[in-house]
Image (spheres, rainbow, N blue to C red):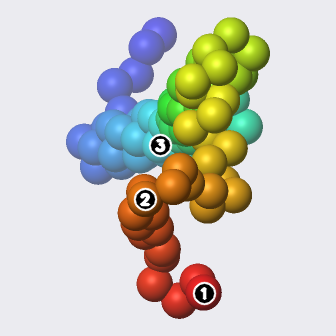
Amino acid sequence: MYRKPPPAESSRTRLLTALLLTAVFLVTGAILLFNRNGFMAITEIQEDVHRVTTTNRLVESEIDSLNQVIFLLENDSLYMEKRVREILGWGYEDETIIRFMEPGTE
């Protein structure tokens, strides 16, 4: 026959069950958060992907700009003359050349 446990044993059993369930949930939460495939790792990886994507876009825009300069140097003689004159500091007769220099670079 089934015997009902005394009230003190019943409350202790409920307390132990509640503590056990709480411990299981805490351990499960910790595993989900902090293991190498957990939420924290995924968030860190997403930040890395965002950072690399941003850098990639910047590099792509710089490449596009340099490709445009290459195209102009290969196909536009006036642009090439302008760039050579800027780099070498050459000018035409009676032309005033103004150079803008970064502070500290002489």
* First of labels 3, 2 by sequence position: 3
Of helix, strand and loop, which one carries label 2? loop
> Could you say which is closer to the camera, residue 88 or residue 48?
88
Marks 3 and 1 sit apart, C-alpha to C-alpha, by 65 Å
Q: Is the residue marked by circle 1 packed among few (<14), some (14-19), or many (20+) residues within 10 Å?
A: few
26 shown above or below 72:
below
Mark 3 and mark 2 residues within 8 Å of each other at the beta carbon: no
Marks 1 and 2 sit apart, C-alpha to C-alpha, by 25 Å
Residue position marked by numbered label 1 in the rendering: 106
* First of labels 3, 1 by sequence position: 3
Residue 13 at least partly seen: no
> Could you say which is closer to the camera, residue 41 or residue 47?
47
The location of residue 100, given as percent across then percent down, is 43, 68
Label ID, residue 94: 2
Residue position marked by numbered label 3 in the rendering: 26
> Could you say which is closer to the camera, residue 75 or residue 71?
75
Which amino acid is tagged 1?
Glu
Q: Is the residue marked by circle 3 packed among few (<14), some (14-19), or many (20+) residues within 10 Å?
A: few
The location of residue 81, given as percent across then percent down, is 63, 34
Q: Residue at x 58, y 83 (%)?
A: 105
Of helix, strand and loop, which one carries label 3? helix
Which amino acid is tagged 2?
Asp
